[in-house]
Image: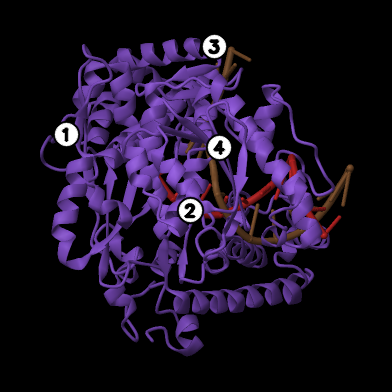
Chain colours: A purple, B red, C brown
Amino acid sequence: MSTLHLDLATADADRLWDYGPGFVRLAGFAVGDSPVVTTTDITMVVEMIEKADLVVGHNVLGFDLPALELYYGLDLARLVREDRVMDTLLAARQNDPPLSGKVDARRYSLDALAKRLELGGKPAGDCGSALKTLACEFEGYDKIPVDHPDYVRYLVQDVELVRELSKLLVVDDYLRREHQVMWRLGHIAKHGFRVDLDLVQRLIAERAARVETLKKRLYTVHGLPLAGKKPHTTTAGILALEKAFIDLGVTPPRTPTGALATGKEALTQLETQHPENVGLVELCQTLRTFNGERSMAQTLLENSSSDGRVHPGVAAVQATGRISITDPGLSVMGKRDRGNICERAMLLPDVGHVLIGADLSQIDARAMAMHCQDENYIAALAPGKDMHDEMAAAVFGEDGWVRGAGHHPRRGDAKAITHATTYGMGPAALAASAGYSLADAERQLATLELKFPGLAAFKKWIRADASRQVIANAFGRRMRVQPGKEYTQAPAHIGQGTARDLMMEGVLRLPEWLLPGLRAIVHDEIVLSVPEHRADEAEAAVLDALQFAYRIAPDAASVLVLADRSDRGHDWADCYRSEKKGWPEVARDHRELMTCTYVGCTWHTTDNLSQEGRAA
DNA sequence: TCTGGACGCGCC
DNA sequence: AAAGGGCGCGTCCAGA
């Protein structure tokens, strides 16, 4: 068995996808326990990799091997298919999972791991690491002489660290599966998402104009400063705003920490409390409009490569294992709001392609059902049933609901309660968010416990289990729970983490010809760009992959995983035109009209039309 | 000049 | 005793 430990020295890592030849500058490798070799003969290293039984490296699946695939034709698909890659970054996260939040964001670098495991750290320079120091000195990672002794020493040390680290990491079945998963998701970064740069430019200009108007209004009417991107959140702006509120006869709203509250909630509350105060209502509305201004178009532009595409980062860094897509953050693009769902119109299928998509139905609830094995809960998720109707019937009774003839009148309330219970929401918060009395909220949560005893028992068990700090989901993903937060985090991690792995099960079941078309994963949704003439076939394949029955143990009851497909789109927003029937502008056909007569259309507004006509 | 925290927006 | 989870990004500010 020959194991090759690998690390590359490259130009700026951010430019992996568009730097061009010369990106990989120096390779360091060690076979087994033999000394580390460094070389600029990258072709030779690729040949060594293809001969090795196992290639080991830190983030090799996310960086080094894709670089060698892109620039040197490495057959990465084969390496992964034959289980010949071991990524110590993936392994480290499974071995020692991260807490939620940002606290653990820097715990998994090779440096940090080496320090934590006492493998001997790296000497730090002026700019941080030794490598950064060199990059500073020579003004660019791609300007460091490849024979610089510090550069070579750094690379040698990294390969040695990888080798030592790999000896300490446990490889389990989940980790092996995770390598397959992350290789597949790697196609999202590799191929990128095509951007409508003309539309991006137009939206940037329109936003700038709107922001200017808002700033001027706050300046002339309320005496706020004009400087800054958000004057009302600067020190001077806050002072002026406090004065404006007092002048308008109200006490300035506060956040829990005592700062001036300028958020949606506080402003809406002020408006409802003082509807007759015209000046105040105007101020609140202006501030809310300002808060709502986002710069997604700017972000897309800044992350676009020279190929006219964004190549986002894709990683499983979250405490639950959920997939983060960043730079740009595709998972946080507009969807629910009429005002910003058209952000997705900036993302396009490849030329000659259409975008297709599907989302998993109530996947968090199904994940909970699998784990808790509650008969009633599983029954509520049976095919043909509407889960929220069933939950409504369980909590509120069946009065006023005729099965098969429309939804339960309190379906919407039940939806919130189901969500609340999975995440451990208490009666007070439920009452506040849903507008119930405390007693009603208490009764509803209690009813839920009675009707779904298995669910209640499971939550109790997993909370206790979390006292060991690390819990595992049905697939074997290990998830860290913060001590003290077991009550809410433990069930939530199971719901989210298993939902994630069910989606990844679907990704693993996708036929390989679809992988180059992968464009985004948004937790329970998957988006692909496929050739228009193969769209039927692709949609069938995606639904087939995403839908299956799953049992968490040989003797457990199986639960179905079901998916709904979205529309074929000529841009990403276009995929939701039937889901958002009331918003005609979601459809690309509508957006291409010169003008429209729909009241409330967020595309054909007078502001937009006055720019230069939207339908170019 | 850079970085981390706070805040507030958005997504699931 | 009570307890809503997980994120990314832009902006501003304080502190190094």
Label 1 vs label 3, nearer the camera? 3
Nearer the observer, A249 or A597: A597
Q: Secondary structure at mark 3?
A: helix
Q: Are marks 4 and 1 on the same chain?
A: yes
- Quadrant position of residue A19: bottom right
Say which residue label 3 marks: A468
Q: Quadrant of residue A550?
A: top left
* Residue pictured at 49% horizontal, 19% vertical: A170
Same chain letter for marks 4 and 2 = yes
Q: Is residue A399 above or below residue A214?
A: above
Label 2 packing within 10 angstroms: few (<14), some (14-19), many (20+):
some
A345 vs A234, nearest the viewer: A345
Distance between the alpha carbons at the discs numbered 3 and 4? 28 Å
Q: Is residue A384 left or right of residue A598?
A: left
Same chain letter for marks 1 and 3: yes
Amino acid type shown at disc 1: Lys
What subunit carries mark 4?
A: A
The C terminus of chain A lies in which quarter of the figure? bottom left
The count of marks equals: 4
Work out whether residue A500 or residue A389 is closer to the camera in this orientation and state it. Answer: A500
Residue at image position (77%, 45%) is: A130
Q: Which residue is at 41% across, 48% downward?
A: A186
Q: Give left or right: position of A179 versus A540.
A: right
Disc 1 marks which residue?
A385
* Residue underneath mark 4: A58
Amino acid carrying label 2: it is Thr
Report the residue marked by disc 2. A43
Query: Residue A58, how many percent across, how many down?
Result: 55, 37
Q: Earlier in the sequence, mark 1 or mark 2?
A: 2
